[in-house]
Image (cartoon, grey):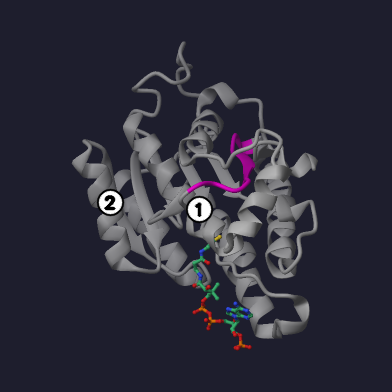
Amino acid sequence: MTDVPTDPFRDDMLKGRVVFVSGGSSGVNLGVATRFAEKGAHVTLVSRTEEKLIAAADTITSAGGSADYAVADVRDAEAVRAALELCHERHGLIDVVLSGAAGNFLAPVNKLSSNGFRTVIDIDLIGTYNVLKHSYDLLRRPGAALISISAPQAVRPMAEQSHAGAAKAGINMLTKNLALEWGGEGIRVNAISPGYIANTEGTSRLIDTPEKSEALLRKIPVGRLGEKTEIADLALFLASDRAAYITGAIFDCDGGLTLN
Ligand code: COA
């Protein structure tokens, strides 16, 4: 284990750590990457679209952080492996992996083709498998922290979300299995289940009318959407050595949504 900081949120708490973030060009994942870079980490952002990656990495470096990118579709195991190897060649052993790439849309089962269902399983579940599994040989051990991104629909059924619910439930169990298999080598694996987070594509895809927005706010015990920084702070803690005894856990960060 590397040295334990006295203040888990001090500015250099991730100094020199190498972080790989899939889905890192936008949303919650970019929020986490930005926060990690503020705390001294180098972040390699990975997604399908180079223009978005360039803009995201520029935003981080303009603020004084260290960021670069690799283009890969998480459905393509070889492309994922190449992106991880690029990160490793450039920056050394990988300390933290955030697997957050996801795809989603609202569709009732009767309007969803097998290919539509498979597409979300491929991006979310197989994509997480590809990222975490292929990171294994390149991780700093002991000490590596892997974080996957789940969702409330993994544990509570949600209309028009059979595909995402099944994929995210799979991610929860994959997270626990990897924690079990890799714990002895000093690799921790946890998941964060963000609820509805403001100003993200994920939320705007699911909450697409003012009526849905009002109904949703009534269901969230704290009465508001979450902020990207709130997911980032949880990820920061999980990535830090202060979370050294936490593995195989799924953390709801959803304002209490899943209680309802
Ligand atoms: N309702 C029902 N089926 C849908 C659909 C919808 N709204 N959107 C896509 N599909 C189906 C397509 O019809 C297709 O199935 P088919 O071949 O039987 O017609 C299948 O899903 C794949 O669609 P395609 O557009 O070819 O996939 P893609 O790989 O280009 O895109 C998506 C993947 C569909 C997930 C797309 O929404 C995406 O790229 N999303 C990324 C961003 C995102 O979702 N962000 C939120 C993250 S939480």
| Mark 1 or mark 2, earlier in chain | 2
Query: Residue 160 is drawn in which quadrant?
Result: bottom right
Mark 1–mark 2 distance (CA, rounded to whole Å): 21 Å
Residue 57 shows which numbered tag? 2
Q: Is residue 186 magenta?
A: yes
Residue 135 shows which numbered tag? 1
**Picture layout, residue 48 above or below residue 45:** below
Which one is nearer the viewer's eye here, 111 or 233? 111
Question: Which quadrant of the rendered structure holds the C terminus?
Answer: top right
> Circle 1 sits in a helix, a strand or a loop, which is it?
helix
Which one is nearer the viewer's eye here, 151 or 79? 151
- Label 2 neighbour load within 10 Å: few <14, some 14-19, many 20+: many
Q: Quadrant of ligand 1?
A: bottom right
**Picture layout, residue 99 above or below residue 32:** below
Q: Are marks 1 and 2 in contact (CB under 8 Å)?
A: no
Query: Residue 248 is drawn in which quadrant?
Result: top right
Q: Going by the image, does 172 lie left or right of 226?
A: right
Q: Is residue 146 magenta?
A: no
The answer to whether residue 30 of the structure is visible from this angle is yes
Q: Nearer the viewer, mark 1 or mark 2?
A: 2
Three-letter amino acid code at disc 2? Ala
Question: Residue lying furthest top in this view?
Answer: 6
Q: Residue at x 76, y 60 (%)?
A: 158
Q: Going by the image, does 251 lie left or right of 137?
A: right
Q: Residue 83: horizontal and vertical position, in percent?
A: 39, 61
Q: Residue at x 25, y 47 (%)?
A: 59
Q: Which residues are magenta?
A: 185-198
Residue 65 shows which numbered tag? none
**Picture layout, residue 91 above or below residue 130:** above
Callout count: 2
